[in-house]
Amino acid sequence: MHTDTERCLRAVRSKDARFDGWFFTAVLTTGIYCRPSCPVVPPKPANMVFHPSAAACQQAGFRACKRCRPDTSPGSPEWNRRADLTARAMRLIADGVVDREGVPGLAARLGYSTRQIERQLRAELGAGPLALARAQRAQTARLLIETTRLPMADLAFAAGFSSVRTFNDTVREVFALTPGELRTRAPEQGTGGAPGGALTLRLPFRTPFNPDNLFGHLAATAVPGVEEWRTGAYRRTLRLPRGHGIVALAPTPDHIACRLTLTDLRDLPVAISRCRRLLDLDADPAAVDGQLRTDPVLAPLVDKAPGRRVPRTVDAAEFAVRAVLGQQVSTAAARTHAARLVTAHGDPVDDPEGGLTHLFPTPEALAEVDPGTLAMPRTRRATLTTLVRHLADGSLALGVDSDWPATRERLLALPGFGPWTADVIALRALGDPDAFLPTDLGIRRAAQHLGLPSTPAALAARATGWRPWRAYAVQYLWATDDHPINFLPV
């Protein structure tokens, strides 16, 4: 979008927050960059240039605005809407792959050379993978500086910097303030004294935001020991690259309140990225709802409760296992099956607040399970053991870098995998915004109630007008039922 100067100018003049994260405005006369909704008086058009990312602004020598704090805007929805090389690379960078494995590790996961990755990202984003990762570290550093009392040395390594000197230099360059000055200017400084030494953060999103089906789905399908709904928040355990964590996520009118307890603070950027992905916080509801409103059948559903998000997952392999456990059984039965696996094979954790007891078992742990001990029909046992074996040996990879169509085809080739299982994994685990569930019983009931075709083939043909947002259409169709997944728990 940053190449459409007239459109960008209109967004800046109207201070339209819907475009925050889509592009950034760099002001030539002041040397700062802003989000489109910055509250200051817009500069003259001749003094504005537009960049596709905060990293590109920083590469060009601009520093972040102290008023609108562009580094804290929601992420670009482009990276969750697309499945091309750039989008897959951006999702991996957000998941901390460059910090852990370097650019060669990023390239290896994507199957391209480092030169090709560098060239593609620079062409589209104005910055290479190292600069993009650096911008993410700077954002994490600011978050920790302003919301915790951690000593600066500990904070630097938690944010992903290799040395305190690099941390100090980056913060001064990006924000034109020292770390100490940033902490002094923070309107509300955290104490780090939440239960269990948790970090308290705010996760932004684009409005409108409807939390009902999002948190309703997560709470209704929660696996005991791994997830729970408590005092207005969804809580769960997280398996992270350097350890584990426990997160509590609670909806508020203008942000998601996030409380994180981590065994290794270096996992903070990854934990934040996975929580944002779980709640689909980088979605563009204006684009989604605008497209779905063009259908006269869906328009009343969208107008009644706009801003629905797709409940996703923090671990694609975990969700694939749970999808198999949920084949042709009720939500309660699927939870029972999953809870048995967790108790028997999950890694135990200590929850300072009580309630959560385990991490969900890894595919490697489940691959060692004797199939005869699984209390489920023989065919589903075979499906589960085949899935975990392929996940454990790496012949099937599920993650943020997955190629959506190719992965769906690989899933369908596995014994016991039909369209519903492959499609629900594409929708919730892979994050495909166009995944659709024409064979789902709830979708077919909703279609019949609304006068839409109820047979899978006819419904799929009717749904072509909802592309590329059919995953969101699924949420609006599900919401016509009175199932607990559609209501915010009380």
Image (tube, grey):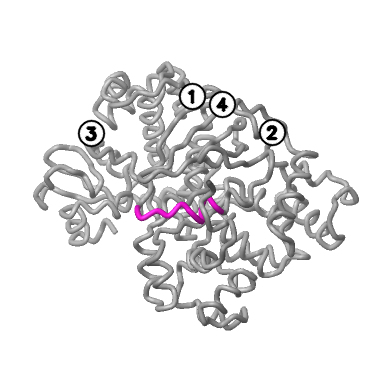
Q: Quadrant of residue 424?
A: bottom right
Callout 2: helix, strand or loop? loop
Identity, as a three-letter code, of the amino acid under mark 4:
Asp
Q: Residue at x 59, y 51 (%)?
A: 399
- Whichever of labels 3 and 2 marks the residue nearer the N terminus, that label is 3
- Residue 4 numbered mark, or none: none
- Whichever of labels 4 and 3 marks the residue nearer the N terminus, that label is 3
- Whichever of labels 2 and 4 marks the residue nearer the N terminus, that label is 4
Callout 1: helix, strand or loop? loop
- Whichever of labels 1 and 2 marks the residue nearer the N terminus, that label is 1
- Residue 194 numbered mark, or none: 1
Q: Residues within 10 Å of mark 1 (few under 14, many from 20)?
A: few
Identity, as a three-letter code, of the amino acid under mark 2:
Thr
Please give the residue where the numbered disc 4 appears in the rendered image: 264
Circles 1 and 2, Cβ within 8 Å, touching? The answer is no
Q: Which residues are magenta?
A: 207-216
